[in-house]
Image: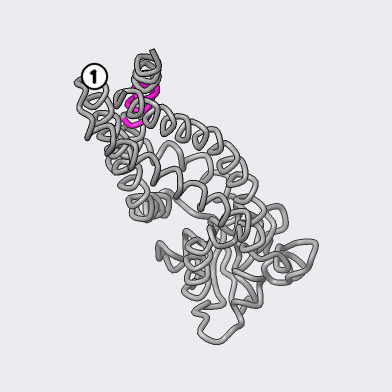
Amino acid sequence: MCQKFSCVMLVILNILVVIAGIALMVVGGVIIGSRDFVVQQLRTAFDTASQSTGANEEIFYKVVKLFQQVAGPLGIALLVIGIFLFVTAIICFVGVCCHVRVMVIIYAIIVGVIALAHIILVIVYFSKKELFLTAIYDSMEDMTKNYKSIESGEAESITFGLLMAMLECCGFNDANDFNAAGSQFTREDSYNGVEFANIQYPVPCCRRDAIGPNANDCPRSFTADNSNTQTGCKQKIYERAVPILDTVILGSLVVLAVELFALAMAIIYLCCEGK
């Protein structure tokens, strides 16, 4: 009786795992190969940010290309995870449906390792949340150092300019990053046909409604009222990313419960089969 119950539960659970695996493979494939999808998702954000950067269509497609290069590893990761889930479910199906004990043991070991890794991940996350943003911080710090101007046409400068405009921030820690040793900021740029020379900070550090050619306008004069020079993008990324990560990690506790339930069912199946 207990063997039949555990068998049915394992089959139902792994049907869901197969569906999840296929979904991840599809999403990963779309991220890797669908340029049109990426263009559609970035269009709205670009149109909003371009109001304060003056970026044009040519710049937009440079940003799309750079985003695809960055998103590629994410797509590959989702594809690999999807394949892994699919294969794990197949191992379970073969084990319980064909009564191959060794396959169920392999399945139980895999699920046990995944559950243990999941528990460690949750503990580490709530102990030090910023650790999960290290890669983003490192990339943003490099973009701050390498930023020249929107006018330069370089994809990295354009991307960081758009990011500063969208997040309403300036530099990594704050605007002083552009005055630090090693900064490549050119101190000149143009916006809507107006040339700006000898500016203190980049044009994207200005607030959208405060850019103008007059002496008191940004970027000729940077103040707390017309710019975001006192707010670093590190702070903004943390404020935006952590609530999302909190939701994902807390939501993953449901997945962890499913993992532990699947492990329990596999152990019950093996124990009942041995009787």
**Left or right placement of residue 256 versus residue 155 in this view:** right
Quick check: 193 above or below 79?
below
Residue projecting furthest to the bottom: 181
Q: Report which quarter residue 163 is drawn in.
A: bottom right
Q: What residue do we see at 63% from left, 76% from top?
A: 199
Q: Nearer the viewer, residue 139 or 145?
A: 139
Residue 91 position, x and y percent, is 24, 31
Q: How many marks?
A: 1
Q: Which residue is mark 1?
A: 97
Quick check: 270 above or below 9?
below
Q: Within 10 angstroms of label 1, few (less than 14), some, or many (20 or more) residues?
A: few
User: Residue 248 lies in magenta, yes or no?
Assistant: no
Quick check: 106 above or below 77?
above
Residue 194 position, x and y percent, is 58, 64
Q: What residue do we see at 46% from left, 74% from top?
A: 146
Q: What residue do we see at 54% from left, 33% from top?
A: 254
Secondary structure, magenta segment, majority class: helix
Note whether residue 36 is visible: no
Q: In what element is the residue under mark 1?
A: helix
Q: Write down the region rendered in magenta.
A: 13-21
Q: Label 1 amino acid?
A: Cys
Residue 130 position, x and y percent, is 59, 61
- Image quarter where the N terminus lies is top left
**Left or right placement of residue 136 versus residue 114 in this view:** right
